[in-house]
């Protein structure tokens, strides 16, 4: 494996992991703060669990960005030969 392929592969792997973790945090917020609290008079957990939702959104977005960058880099590696300039 060449050195130029290591970073994109790691980006895709970590991006996929971060996307799953972020999706889990978002799902956890929906499940615990919204669905589990239906009918409760105290709705304060909608507010207090917001950091979990925001961390999940940021983590999922960063993971998707890392996956996208890694896939673009992996597709573009074989298109140019070493020592040749792109037009």
Image (cartoon, helix red, strand yellow):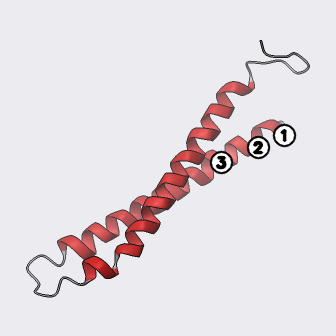
Residue visible at 57% across and 44% down? 67
Residue 41 location (% of width, % of height): 10, 87
Quadrant occupied by the C terminus: top right
Earlier-in-chain disc, 1 versus 3: 1
Quickly name the residue at label 3.
11
Q: Are marks 1 and 2 in contact (CB under 8 Å)?
A: yes
In the rendered image, is residue 45 in sight? yes
Residue 42 location (% of width, % of height): 16, 87
In the rendered image, is residue 1 in sight? no
Quadrant occupied by the N terminus: top right
- Secondary structure under badge 3? helix
Q: Indicate which disc residue 21 carries.
A: none
Quickly name the residue at label 2.
6
Residue visible at 56% across and 39% down? 68
Query: Is residue 62 rendered to the left or right of residue 7?
Result: left
Residue 29 location (% of width, % of height): 32, 70
- Secondary structure under badge 1? helix
Residue visible at 57% across and 51% down? 15
- Secondary structure under badge 2? helix
> Quick check: 59 above or below 15?
below
Query: Is residue 38 rendered to the left or right of residue 21?
Result: left
Quickly name the residue at label 1.
3
Q: Callout 1: few (<14), some (14-19), or many (20+) C-alpha neighbours within 10 Å?
A: few
Earlier-in-chain disc, 3 versus 2: 2
> Quick check: 22 above or below 73?
below
Q: CA distance from mark 3 to mark 2?
A: 9 Å
């Amino acid at each position: 494996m060449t050195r130029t392929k290591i970073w994109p592969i790691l980006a895709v792997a970590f991006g996929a992991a971060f996307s799953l973790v972020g999706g889990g945090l978002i799902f956890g917020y929906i499940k615990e703060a919204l669905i589990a609290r239906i009918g409760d008079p105290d709705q304060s957990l909608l507010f207090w669990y917001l950091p979990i939702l925001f961390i999940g959104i940021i983590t999922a977005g960063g993971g998707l960005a890392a996956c996208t960058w890694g896939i673009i880099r992996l597709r573009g590696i074989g298109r140019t030969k070493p020592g040749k300039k792109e037009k």
